[in-house]
Amino acid sequence: MIGSSVAGYPAIIIRNTATDYLVTDNVLGEYGARTENDIIYNTDVSSRGICKDNVSFFTDNLLLNGGFENDGAGGADVFANWTETLSGTGTVTKDLVVFHGGAASCKLLTAGAWGVNVISSFAVEPGSRVRLTMECRGDGTHDGLWQLYDYINGAALAAAEHTLITAAAFSTVTHDYTIPAGCYTLQLYLYAPLEDNGYCYWDDVVMRKIS
Ligand SMILES: [Ca+2]
Ligand SMILES: [Ca+2]
């Protein structure tokens, strides 16, 4: 079951067109050898899962690189494990001067057009409760926004929310969610401020199962 796979064998959480979903300790024969954090696509490309070894949904951070310490491949790929989206002349920056934990944060700048964001995709358990905690910082005037998107059902869990942290100092934002039925993959969107030339910082983003 989820969270109790056998060491050395990948657990795969995957939505399946035939059986609503499949949770198994060893599906190597069906899907080939996989390593942790591989994204697995079913033949129906709208369905996918994430391969996990020995997951504890209660203690582990469900998302990866929430501290923005790990680099992407370079260029537009700033961070590992996050998908960067640019808009106008806005930017996504690994900031090595302003951060909450470790030695880096994610700085998002709006310029020309709103919409700069970074997205994390991660596995969740339908019907469970999760707690999102994030360290957020504004530019003194503007705040960022976030949104959770149910990748499987194709619907946002709620409208995009302002962090309300406009001050140039990190503060913790916490929000609990119930994972919808049938939702095995969730996406967290972190957005730059709505206002032109506004910027904000994100760090120590954690999603944990709480019940
Ligand atoms: Ca950090
Ligand atoms: Ca990236």
Image (cartoon, grey):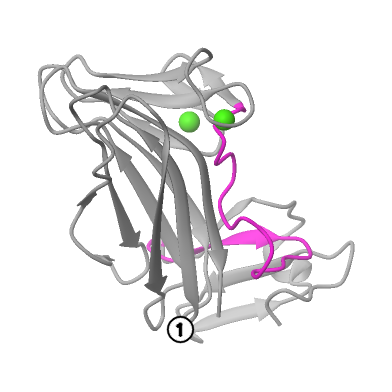
Q: Is residue 114 left or right of residue 13?
A: left
61, 83: nearer the viewer: 61
Residue 92 position (above or below residue 148): above
Residue 79 horizontal/vertical position (percent):
51, 28
**Residue 41 seen from this side:** no
Identify the residue shown where x is 19% and y is 14%. Answer: 89
Residue 6 position (above or below residue 40): below
| Residue labelled 1 has its Cβ within 8 Å of some atom of ligand 2 | no
Residue 70 position (above or below residue 53): above
Range of magenta residues: 45-70
Q: Which residue is mark 1?
A: 127
Outermost bottom residue = 19
Residue 181 horizontal/vertical position (percent):
39, 83
Based on the picture, tell me whether residue 6 belongs to the magenta stretch.
no
Residue 104 position (above or below residue 53): above
117, 16: nearer the viewer: 117
In which quadrant will I find the C terminus? bottom right
Residue 56 horizontal/vertical position (percent):
71, 68
Residue 171 horizontal/vertical position (percent):
41, 40
Q: Amino acid at mark 1?
A: Gly
Q: Tell me the SS state at disc 1.
A: loop
Identify the residue shown where x is 89% and y is 65%. Answer: 7
Q: Is residue 172 left or right of residue 51?
A: left
Identify the residue shown where x is 77% and y is 66%. Answer: 28
100, 64: nearer the viewer: 100
Based on the picture, tell me whether residue 51 belongs to the magenta stretch.
yes
User: Mostly what secondary structure, the magenta segment?
Assistant: loop
Identify the residue shown where x is 66% and y is 59%. Answer: 51
